[in-house]
Image (cartoon, rainbow, N blue to C red):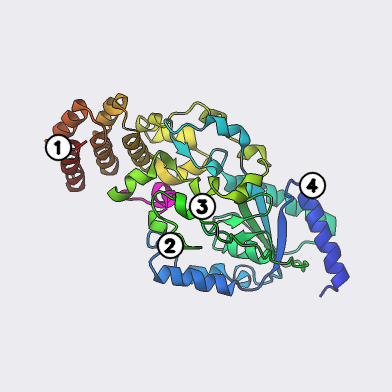
């Protein structure tokens, strides 16, 4: 058991080494259960707010809220916030080419941060002269990240449920190290969003249904990434031209106006995305998709998910120039993609689009796609 002065010295060393590794934003909390956050998450599951995430269960929450269940010797949780907002990418954003959430324009942050945090721990071990037990978490293991970030004093939870870090806003990736090191815990911040409702008001699908609550099934990020099925028709127009994730509630947030720039080069926009047009995805096979997106967060949506998303985006653009491409997509091997291509064609006021829909309707075999085609033909007469 360390005394207070030893804990202060150890904490100071941990911070100094972190800064040397490019991690200036870190805070410490005790390895105590995040009971209140777990209770809230459990209630939201019961209310059906996470119905689309079958893996997010109450048992998982119990595990994710208790550091000592993840590392029996845990004494501290160190949470890191990593800025990823790349100002240089702002001028390249083009709704006609498709929007990708900013965190996904660089290399896969899971690998990047795990690699960097592993190097950090090796240097910290050298600096302190002994080897503590620890586990590194980067959004891919059971841990209530925002809960421990809040408890550590990194920031507060906004009405859009994102962590808001003073001076950085929500343009941050979170990572944690649960460790047996006895560190001095930081104090939680007492800020709130006050009366601001900008994130609630801007959400086009009404996903932010109440203060500090997001209806997962209506969130564009869920619909375009985690969702493996059809995007509900009543939400397709709201998706706009977002083909992977969504940043709307972050872009409008006043706290984000003071955000600092991206820290690590791996998180900057990739060169191959600078001139990328989403329409290319509709012509890709699995090998081409892998070649273009391997090692990036986009892989999580899978090829047919991205093709589905592109169809919805093209339907919302409504450009006659896209009729030929969408007509080709009606022959895609995946029913999920064909059905959304049908909807997209129904949104384009072109005789050619209607002809394509009727032609495909005469040969389609899949029951769900047939329903999409039939409704698309009916809807097109009203465009």
Quick one: 261 or 328, which is closer to the camera? 261
In terms of sequence position, does the residue under pointer 1 or pointer 4 come before the other? 4
Q: Position of residue 362 (x, y in %)?
A: 11, 35
* Dot 2 and dot 3 residues touching (CB under 8 Å): no
Above or below for 322 versus 338 = above
Q: Which residue is mark 1?
A: 361
Say few, some or many: other residues with alpha carbon within 10 Å of mark 3 (under 14 / 14 to 19 / 20 or more). some
Residue that numbered label 3 is attached to: 198
Q: Is residue 263 left or right of residue 244?
A: right
Distance between the alpha carbons at the discs numbered 4 and 2: 37 Å
Tell whether 192 sits left or right of 101.
right
119 left or right of 365 in image:
right
Name above or below for residue 331 compared with residue 370: above
Left or right: 67, with 321 as reference point:
right
Which residue, given by chain and number where applicable, does mark 2 sit on?
55
- Give me the C-alpha separation between circle 2 and circle 3: 31 Å
* Secondary structure beneath label 2: loop
Image quadrant where one finds the N terminus: bottom right
The residue at the point 21 percent across, 29 percent down is 353
The x and y percentages for residue 243 are 42, 40
Residue occupied by mark 4: 20
- Residue 252 in the magenta stretch? The answer is no
Quarter of the view holding residue 51: bottom left
Would you say residue 224 sits in the magenta stretch? yes
How far apart marks 2 and 1 lie (CA) works out to 37 Å
Query: What is the number of the mark on residue 244?
Result: none
Question: Which stretch is magenta?
Answer: 219-232
């Amino acid at each position: 058991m360390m005394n207070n002065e030893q804990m202060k010295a150890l904490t100071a060393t941990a911070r100094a080494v972190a800064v040397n590794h490019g991690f200036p934003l870190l805070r410490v909390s005790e390895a105590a259960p995040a009971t209140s956050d777990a209770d809230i998450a459990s209630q939201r599951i019961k209310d059906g707010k996470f119905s689309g995430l079958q893996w997010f269960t109450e048992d998982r929450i119990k595990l994710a809220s208790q550091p000592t269940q993840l590392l029996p010797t845990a004494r501290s949780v160190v949470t890191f916030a990593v800025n990823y907002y790349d100002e240089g990418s702002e001028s390249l954003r083009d709704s006609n080419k498709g929007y990708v959430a900013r965190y996904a324009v660089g290399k896969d942050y899971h690998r990047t941060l795990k690699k960097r945090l592993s190097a950090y721990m090796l240097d910290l071990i050298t600096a302190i002269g002994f080897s503590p037990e620890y586990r590194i978490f980067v959004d891919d293991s059971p841990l209530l990240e925002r809960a421990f970030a809040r408890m550590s004093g990194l920031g507060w939870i906004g009405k859009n449920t994102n962590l808001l870090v003073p001076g950085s806003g929500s343009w941050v990736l979170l990572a944690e190290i649960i460790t047996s090191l006895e560190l001095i815990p930081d104090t939680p911040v007492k800020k709130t969003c006050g009366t601001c409702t900008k994130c609630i008001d801007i959400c086009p699908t009404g996903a932010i249904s109440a203060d500090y609550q997001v209806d997962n099934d209506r969130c564009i990020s869920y619909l375009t990434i985690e969702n493996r099925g059809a995007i509900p028709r009543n939400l397709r127009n709201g998706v706009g031209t977002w083909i992977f994730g969504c940043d709307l509630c972050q872009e409008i947030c006043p706290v984000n106006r003071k955000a600092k720039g991206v820290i690590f080069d791996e998180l900057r926009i990739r060169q191959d995305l600078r001139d990328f047009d989403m329409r290319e995805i509709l012509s890709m096979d699995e090998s081409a998709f892998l070649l273009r997106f391997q090692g990036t967060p986009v892989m999580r949506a899978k090829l047919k998910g991205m093709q589905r998303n592109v169809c919805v985006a093209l339907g919302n653009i409504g450009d006659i120039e896209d009729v030929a491409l969408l007509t080709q997509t009606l022959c895609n091997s995946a029913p999920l993609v064909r059905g959304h291509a049908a909807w997209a064609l129904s949104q384009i006021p072109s005789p050619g689009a209607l002809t394509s829909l009727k032609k495909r309707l005469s040969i389609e075999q899949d029951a769900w796609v047939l329903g999409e085609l039939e409704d698309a033909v009916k809807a097109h007469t009203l465009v």
